[in-house]
Image (cartoon, rainbow, N blue to C red):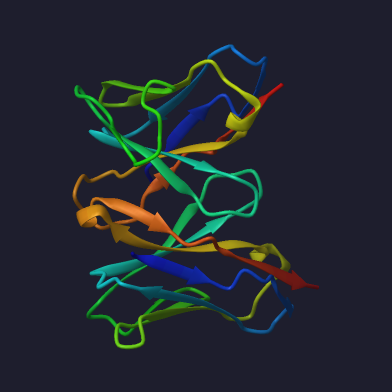
Amino acid sequence: SQKIEQNSEALNIQEGKTATLTCNYTNYSPAYLQWYRQDPGRGPVFLLLIRENEKEKRKERLKVTFDTTLKQSLFHITASQPADSATYLCALPGGGGFKTIFGAGTRLFVKA
Amino acid sequence: GAVVSQHPSWVICKSGTSVKIECRSLDFQATTMFWYRQFPKQSLMLMATSNEGSKATYEQGVEKDKFLINHASLTLSTLTVTSAHPEDSSFYICSAREVAGSPGGYTFGSGTRLTVV
């Protein structure tokens, strides 16, 4: 069955450093992959979408890579700030591409 | 940008009662909306796909008679948890996409924290 794996352990980093989060998937050949941010008690907020033919995508301090051979996406936040502390979710299309399937997310803590 | 409004943000109800949660797309029309539930530290689990003017499509294991979905207009979908029990306590979130069929990101509501006592 289709499976998305994100590191369940929280990631703690120092302000100013680069945070790198990993999303691995199995039994998928997605046409694209999405990353969302979720704050406690709130709904997710869309950050970036990367297509299968794109190796890398950037948006301000965010960078996403997509390796369809490794079946992996990396999500980077450069010059991290305490305000970046949140849970980051990886999402893939499922159910024929009409639905979205989410990973469990990785909690990021950025210390000042 | 696209905004999805979800109401209420939290609700406490007694066992056996029903609770209605509303999800509105404020500045776009959504022929399809999605309902998720999320338990603490777990992923969003898709419950059902709400289709304007037709029956909702429920995911396997989700009781359609317990979680009633109505999508009567292009901007409003409602989820009613009927005969709620403590195990229904969870975080319920709706989402919609501004352009149907496009792979762009989904817009989520702010979620509803349901506590059944």
Quick check: A101 above or below B60? below
Q: Visible in this render: residue A65?
A: no
User: What is the quadrant of the N terminus of chain A in the image?
Assistant: bottom left
Quick check: B68 above or below B60? above
Q: How many marks?
A: 0
- In which image quadrant can residue A47 be found? bottom left
Query: Residue A39 vs residue A48: left or right?
Result: right
Q: Nearer the viewer, residue A62 or B53?
A: B53
Please name the residue shown 73% across and 72% down the image.
A110
Q: Tell which residue pokes out farthest to the bottom in this image.
A: A69
User: What is the quadrant of the C terminus of chain A in the image?
Assistant: bottom right
Residue B43 position within the rendered picture, expressed as x and y whole percent measured from the top left: 52, 54
Please name the residue shown 35% across and 37% down the image.
B48
Q: Visible in this render: residue A54?
A: yes
Please name the residue shown 22% across and 80% down the image.
A53
Query: Residue A96 vs residue A38: left or right?
Result: left
Residue A18 position within the rendered picture, expressed as x and y whole percent measured from the top left: 62, 83
Quick check: B44 above or below A28? above
Q: Nearer the viewer, residue B32 or B89?
A: B89
Residue A50 position within the rendered picture, expressed as x and y whole percent measured from the top left: 32, 72
Query: Residue A64 vs residue B76: left or right?
Result: right
Q: Nearer the viewer, residue A25 or B85?
A: B85
Q: Nearer the viewer, residue B44 or A78?
A: B44
Quick check: B38 above or below B8? below
Please name the residue shown 70% across and 82% down the image.
A16
Residue A11 position within the rendered picture, expressed as x and y whole percent measured from the top left: 68, 74
